Amino acid sequence: MSEAIDAAFGGDPAFVPYLAVGDPDVESSLEYVRALERGGADVIELGLPFSEPIAEGPTIQGAVARALEGGMTVERFFEAVERLRDDIDVPLVCMTYYNLIYQYGGEGADRGPEAFVERAAEAGIDGFVVPDLPAEESGPLRRTCDERDLDLIFIVAPTTRGERLRKLMERTSGYVYVQARLGVTGARADVSDRTAESLDRLAEWDVPKAVGFGISSGEQAREVVAAGADGIIVGSALVDIVAEGTENGDPTEEVAARLEATARELNEGAVAGAAERSQSTTRPERT
Amino acid sequence: MSEAIDAAFGGDPAFVPYLAVGDPDVESSLEYVRALERGGADVIELGLPFSEPIAEGPTIQGAVARALEGGMTVERFFEAVERLRDDIDVPLVCMTYYNLIYQYGGEGADRGPEAFVERAAEAGIDGFVVPDLPAEESGPLRRTCDERDLDLIFIVAPTTRGERLRKLMERTSGYVYVQARLGVTGARADVSDRTAESLDRLAEWDVPKAVGFGISSGEQAREVVAAGADGIIVGSALVDIVAEGTENGDPTEEVAARLEATARELNEGAVAGAAERSQSTTRPERT
Amino acid sequence: MSTKFGDYGGQYVPEALMPAIEELEDAFKRYVLENEDGFMDEFRERLRTFGGRPTPLQYAEQLSERHGTDIYLKREDLLHGGAHKLNNALGQVLLAKYMGKERIVAETGAGQHGTATAMAAAHLDMPCEVYMGRRDINRQRPNVFRMRLNGAEVTPVTTGRGTLKEAISETMRDWATTVERTHYVIGSVVGPHPFPTMVREFQSVISEEARRQVREEAGRLPSAVVACAGGGSNTMGTFAEFVDDEDVGLYAVEAGGSSLEVDEEAGVAPNSASLSTGTEGVLHGARTKLLQDPDGQIVESHSVSSGLDYAGVGPELAHLVDEGRVTPATVDDDDALEGFHRLSQDEGIIPALESAHAVAWLGEATADQLGECVVLNVSGRGDKDLESVVEETESRDLENAPSMDVFAEADADGGSL
Amino acid sequence: MSTKFGDYGGQYVPEALMPAIEELEDAFKRYVLENEDGFMDEFRERLRTFGGRPTPLQYAEQLSERHGTDIYLKREDLLHGGAHKLNNALGQVLLAKYMGKERIVAETGAGQHGTATAMAAAHLDMPCEVYMGRRDINRQRPNVFRMRLNGAEVTPVTTGRGTLKEAISETMRDWATTVERTHYVIGSVVGPHPFPTMVREFQSVISEEARRQVREEAGRLPSAVVACAGGGSNTMGTFAEFVDDEDVGLYAVEAGGSSLEVDEEAGVAPNSASLSTGTEGVLHGARTKLLQDPDGQIVESHSVSSGLDYAGVGPELAHLVDEGRVTPATVDDDDALEGFHRLSQDEGIIPALESAHAVAWLGEATADQLGECVVLNVSGRGDKDLESVVEETESRDLENAPSMDVFAEADADGGSL
Ligand SMILES: Cc1ncc(COP(=O)(O)O)c(C=O)c1O
Ligand SMILES: Cc1ncc(COP(=O)(O)O)c(C=O)c1O
């Protein structure tokens, strides 16, 4: 269990932005990550691009494609993380697909999650989100994370109930990624009805609940947190800014400034939501 | 049995040219027929164009298509024959396909070979060649011709032997059309080996043997007659002249003159062949 | 053996072909009718393992519901090559082999008979040449590819309008030239005797199976049996074993084209409805019902479906129609296309445009004609027709036609996300 | 029920799909394995009447002679739709219906699985949407027409190279969005458990029939069983019932493409030989053998045959290869095309380009591998490949390719005699 992540969920609602490392190139994406920290990020999810991002919508698919096109590799990802660690403090979560984790360390006995996790820890990663790794297949990675006090964050879907939910909640550490709606990542104009419903379902579990999938505005952030979330995860809305800036050839600083501003707005929305919630009595408080 | 046709085979070997009436128009084709008579024709086969000339090669298919294109009909054919009868004397044989004969006279009981044959006789036709009417189906037409002393000429193919040959020879009148080779009509550069063989096979039958399918030069005519034929039938070689003249837009008289000259050459070839044959002793003479 | 069906049929062919036709009749009697040298056993065995017989008789749920009666589909579209044509082609090529022939010629219209013959010839290792109208070559590219891929020569016929009629004439010319070593595999129950009888005999496996199957599956004989009719081979094949079942209605559905009127001036019938509108005459070796002008000139037929696009029809069918045993019907181009879309969408079976005529007829028949149990022959599959159906559909205002925008979309999407 | 084959298989999918996958596993056990509510009876009956099963096992005379051994062809090309794909598609769509799902999604590469699913969905009256790579849409026009004609939506996938891999990913995304009322009909023995087991179960009808048929016809079990392998569904279907027959050699023929080398720089494998050259990894929900770079990025596969053009392969096959029970082999594009022409000309069967790989392997196998009796699965027919085969053939120097001049000739002939 990463103490840094634990701490991040300790006070105000956590703002957890996502960016794909290497989009559109390593240097720029590092600038963008720094901007997010300035904008108030409590945890940052760093996407390690995989060629088949089956859980992503068009926006993040585009980021992944741009990053791979730009020559992103697993090793370059770790090097980038190492550089980030020189100047930012927030916990960093690596978001990627299982094959990259599994392949690391080459052929044969060296291969597998151990090598990957070791290298990630060394570079400064605090936890992992692996969208194509359900509880059933997570044994080796969970064990390895435990050995190194790193978090393995699971996604809870609107369809996750009963026995499955229990299994997941027992395995997740750091926080649980509450998927706000069915489908893939992507910015939406409205908050799903299912968010409140999911948070209700999770109420009995004593682990921070960060809601993601579709949040794109401070207003939405507020609503989600008011509904009981301990944090908000925002990806596509931020990646959109990178995509647009890249397309228009805008200077990195300008794009970074926009990211920072948006981050601030989202963060403020979350804080406002928390204030609302503490006034209400219907929602259980985090202990 | 038409006396005129009988007479035509009485002396010198008979020269029997073919033209399609209406190719490329009625007027011209009548001029051409007259030219053939001047060139020495003993019998003339007048093609009444049918839309599916399955026994014809490309040359005569072309003539038929041009004639139909030009508006040729069965009635116009008979009218043309009537006009020919005003100024030429040689026997005229109508060459056509059975459906036109069968349809004549309209729907119901009036339809059938009787009406056609009656009209043909009235117009001045002496006999018929119907390439798609084998002995088996010829009963009605044979009877009708007999009633009016008209000839029904059958084609003997290289493949006709034994019982079939007997049946055909018993039914044919006027002359027998000896098909020089397998296949369809069309001018060829050489005389088929099968001609001599066919004439041998027919030797015992006492009916004039006119050979056709492929004869295109005086030299071929000579060979065929020398081999025992009583006459030669020439179609495609003459139709070629019409086709070429039509295509070049040559004046009718010029084309007619060429036809007359070719007819003369063919006729002379046939006469020369007869002279050869009468010197030889290996071939049986006609009785 | 009679060469006629009533007044229809016969042998109106050049003398050069008559010996071959006599030889064929003799071979037909011995090998086919008397199973000499086990011919029929071999034929049936090859139809089974190479052709995929028996083809199923399928209860059509959605179609039955739509028409308020039980409809069973005889699935000739599942036969190797995609149409009933192989039944005949395989029979004739095998017969040619038994007869010692060395070469096969055939005509083709839609290309289905040509492909079936090319397949059978490849299977039995016989050289094969197929005559096909130029216009049909362009209408039926996939079938031309298939014949060539099976090693057959495909010779374009450029006379007339370049369709089936001209292709048959041209094949007869080839045959007349090469008759001694060549067998002409005619593609339907047309042509001189013994072809109509022989082709019907090879195709009657359809009704042998269907009659047995419908009794097994429906527990009864059908009230109506329906098939499209071009030359009429799938028709006679589907009817043959039911002809003696007097209570079974037999419906032959012809191509109504764009109109049933004949334009005599132009020598064109905008349909191919010989049974329904034709008159008696002689074409391609047989006396039968024809589309012709009053002189007896054969007019050009027309149908959206190449395989029905023929001015004649089998003499036995003509006879059965005159006898009142078979009821002819017509379905026009538009309705045939709707029938095509109907079966494709309702049942997941894309029929040949030919067969689509039979499907469309269901919507035009009276409840009395349909009765309670219908057997419909799906004579072939529509793969050969895809391009032309899409084209023809786009130019008409059809109710149930799907849009084909996906190609345009795909082009517009470009290469990126 | 184990979710794995040795170390392969498993369920590597987004959590959102896991409940649906558990529900599917449950339905699979009850309906398929235990025939609850007579599911399997209905499935087998529909396969028979709608699909045309059993397909024949045909002795291939010319091929047997050429290769000096007895070769039997399992004729899945005769199945409705033209490929083995219907076995699975019909099974899954029917299962979806039993499960109360209201909508079907599917991916397709060559379009064969898409057409099979569209047909099954039309037949069972279920709405259906098929994802297909843009590039494949253009390569396989006829199959796109067919899906649209059967009433399915076809959605172009424009990511990556626009082939099967991207189409699967995109379909998974749709499924993740609509999972509660939608069933994803995956097209091969790939994907998360229970798909590989379930698809193999539906496809194993091939070997159930073939095993019985070869014993009937050859009086023995085969020495070798051969099938092409893309995802591996026809392969596992053909092998399944022979796996326990230790003396029967099992050969899975993959697409060797233009070369077996991977261009890591470009992220492209000019082949689709995952079993022969791939390494262990996780793709599309399962651990299996993959074409990937050392990081684990999936590379673009390539084959002249769209249906084999996939960077992964079924986990059970990967396991059987590791166990030494299945022998993988590769056939390159040129040889596959020659195999295509070979079967077309020698046997009168135009195979799918996929199946042509298995045919071509016969020429590369040792006499020892072939033994005295070979069963080869002709997984599909080549109608969908005609245009592309003609094009690909023209650009290569193949020995046995026919010319397609007839179109040029026809054009040049013009309209007159
Ligand atoms: C599928 C199909 N059905 C029907 C026909 C019409 O022929 P027939 O009337 O001889 O069955 C054809 C001819 O090509 C065809 O391809
Ligand atoms: C005819 C045919 N064979 C084989 C394949 C390969 O698939 P699989 O390996 O799953 O059988 C395909 C895929 O589209 C196909 O269409």
Image (tube, coloured by chain):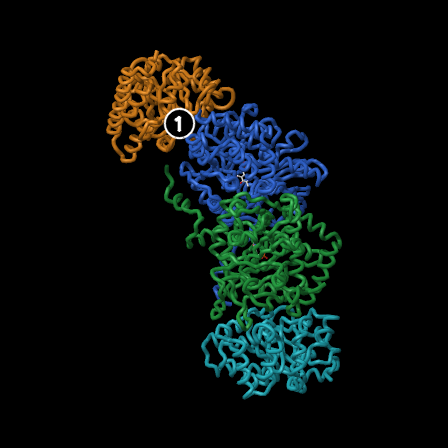
Chain colours: A cyan, B orange, C blue, D green
* Ligand 2 in which quarter: bottom right
Name the amino acid, label 1. Answer: Thr
Image vertical order of residue A154 relative to residue C378, above or below: below
Q: Can you give x and y, in whole percent of width and height, for residue D164 in the image?
A: 55, 61
Q: How many marks?
A: 1
- B155 on left or right of D234: left
Q: Residue B265's x, y, as percent?
A: 25, 24
Name the quadrant of the N terminus of chain C. top right
Could one spot residue A29 in this view of the protein? yes
Q: Is residue D152 above or below residue A37?
A: above
Residue D184's place in the image compared with B257, above or below, is: below
User: Which of B99 and B175 lies nearest the eye of the viewer?
Assistant: B175
Task: Look at 69% across and 47% down and name the residue there.
Answer: D45
Is residue C335 something one can see in this rendering?
no
Q: Residue furthest top?
A: B287
Q: Residue furthest front?
A: D368
> Element at badge 1?
loop
Near mark 1 (Cα within 10 A), the count class, few <14, some 14-19 or many ≥20, is: many
Is residue B47 rendered to the left or right of residue D39? left
Locate residue C368 relative to residue C103 in the image: left or right: right
Q: Quadrant of residue B166?
A: top left
Give whichever of D111, A179 is nearer the camera: D111
Q: Which residue is mark 1?
A: B73
Q: Residue at x 54, y 88 (%)?
A: A86
Q: Position of residue B35 (x, y in %)?
A: 27, 23
Q: Position of residue D102 (x, y in %)?
A: 67, 58
